[in-house]
Image (cartoon, rainbow, N blue to C red):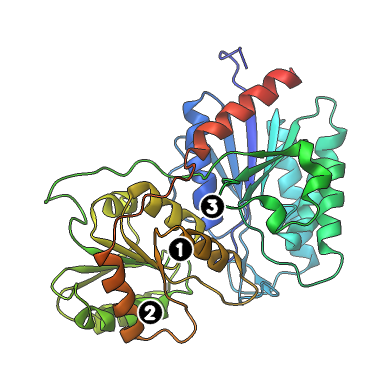
């Protein structure tokens, strides 16, 4: 990539269905891409969330979200189940966006290793890109751990799609912690297409003094989704039972949690507990806090490691989800965090884990968290080779 006068165009597709972790990671990558001089357009298919894209263009598709933990039912912005007419309309819109922007690089977040529900629009998009006179590089951007497949043939289907459409697969993880083959059995078949970037982490957090945001506090977060309310309620009760009972406990409520639940949590909060919506300076809170209690999504766990703060993780294990538990266990073996299982969690159990974490050393795992920079390095290398 040598011609900065005419920057290479990236079209980055992302679909969040329950939480906002996928969108947040995409946003972090988009900011890195913009700083590197790419012309970036993010196409989002989830419900609109205010995220910092670093100046990248955001195109919002008609939004859809999941109504259950198994992602079986998808609804539109009015809560109505989507139908074939809705799907065709959105697929047509996505193709219009592609034809309008004619990207040099097309990136699909998670697909084909997930988001199978969106094949109705992604397969036509990939066919169009593959047949384009100026064919773009086609890249999959995927996290470190895939959800375990329970239906026969699904892994074969993923393999077929990678082999047919994709030039490269960027795995946003560190093989020294876990490699893709541990959760995708056909990894060896596409070994030449797989490149590890390290973990993608928002590095904007600022370490400050005793008056810094979050200084000395216990920060309790449940991500950007609506599935962590029980953790926040349990943490409120655990405070008085722990050695951190004299510290401020700050409850961060996800952006998509309904106002009624937020109001309920506010009403339940005892003295010394602050309830507020998720904040843009969350990474700064982690840099300065005494302890982080979180649900254990990809972004929060890696931000916690980057901040080198003590941590208790309560992995989300609802529906078919397995990745949070697996990642947390791998890190716990390195001694950098404490795990409290979501199933059977009580204030007493959580308080005990808090005490253990506070009496131990801060998280200092030797894990690659420079995924943003490596992603840019790879994109530039591949673009130069494709010129």
Provide the secondary structure element on which disc 3 rests. helix
Q: Quadrant of residue 312?
A: bottom left
116 displayed left or right of 257 = right
Q: Please, is residue 343 above or below residue 56 in the view?
A: below
Q: Which mark is residue 261?
A: 2
Disc 2 to disc 1, C-alpha distance: 31 Å
Disc 1 to disc 3, C-alpha distance: 26 Å
Q: Please, is residue 376 above or below residue 228 in the view?
A: above
- Between disc 1 and disc 3, the foreground one is 1
195 displayed left or right of 304 = right
Residue to which mark 1 is pinned: 332
Residue to which mark 3 is pinned: 23
- Of residue 267 and residue 360, the one placed in the foreground of this image is 360
* Marks 1,3: beta carbons within 8 A: no
Question: Dot 3 surroundings within 10 Å: few (below 14), some, or many (20 or more)?
Answer: many
- Of residue 318 and residue 329, the one placed in the foreground of this image is 329
């Amino acid at each position: 990539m040598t011609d900065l006068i005419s920057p290479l165009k990236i079209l980055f597709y992302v679909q969040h269905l329950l939480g906002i972790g996928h969108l947040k990671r995409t946003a972090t990558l988009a900011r890195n891409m913009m700083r590197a001089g790419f012309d970036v357009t993010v196409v989002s298919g989830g419900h609109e969330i205010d995220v910092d894209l670093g100046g990248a263009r955001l195109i919002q598709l008609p939004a859809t979200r999941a109504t259950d933990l198994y992602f079986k039912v998808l609804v539109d912005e009015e809560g109505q189940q989507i139908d074939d007419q809705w799907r065709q309309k959105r697929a047509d819109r996505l193709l219009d966006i592609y034809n309008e922007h004619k990207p040099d690089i097309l990136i699909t977040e998670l697909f084909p290793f997930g988001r199978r529900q969106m094949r109705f629009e992604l397969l036509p998009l990939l066919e169009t890109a593959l047949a384009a006179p100026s064919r773009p590089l086609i890249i999959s951007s995927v996290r470190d751990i895939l959800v375990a497949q329970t239906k026969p043939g699904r892994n074969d289907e993923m393999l077929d799609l990678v082999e047919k459409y994709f030039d490269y697969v960027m795995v946003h993880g560190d093989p020294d912690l876990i490699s893709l083959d541990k959760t995708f059995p056909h990894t060896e078949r596409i070994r030449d297409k797989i490149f590890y970037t390290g973990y993608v982490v928002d590095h904007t957090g600022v370490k400050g003094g005793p008056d810094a945001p979050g200084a000395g506090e216990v920060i309790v977060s449940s991500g950007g989704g609506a599935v962590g309310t029980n953790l926040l309620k349990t943490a409120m009760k655990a405070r008085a039972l722990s050695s951190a009972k004299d510290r401020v406990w700050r409850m961060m409520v996800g952006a998509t949690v309904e106002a009624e639940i937020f109001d309920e949590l506010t009403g339940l909060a005892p003295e010394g507990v602050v309830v507020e919506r998720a904040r843009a300076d969350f990474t700064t809170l982690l840099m300065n806090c005494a302890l982080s209690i979180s649900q254990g999504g990809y972004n929060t766990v890696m931000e916690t490691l980057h901040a080198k703060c003590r941590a208790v993780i309560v992995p989300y294990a609802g529906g078919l989800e397995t990745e949070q538990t697996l990642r947390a266990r791998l890190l716990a073996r390195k001694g950098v965090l404490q795990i409290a299982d979501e199933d059977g969690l009580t204030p007493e159990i959580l308080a005990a884990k808090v005490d253990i974490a506070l009496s131990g050393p801060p998280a200092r795992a030797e894990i690659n968290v420079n995924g943003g920079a490596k992603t840019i390095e790879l994109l530039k290398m591949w673009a130069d080779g494709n010129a």
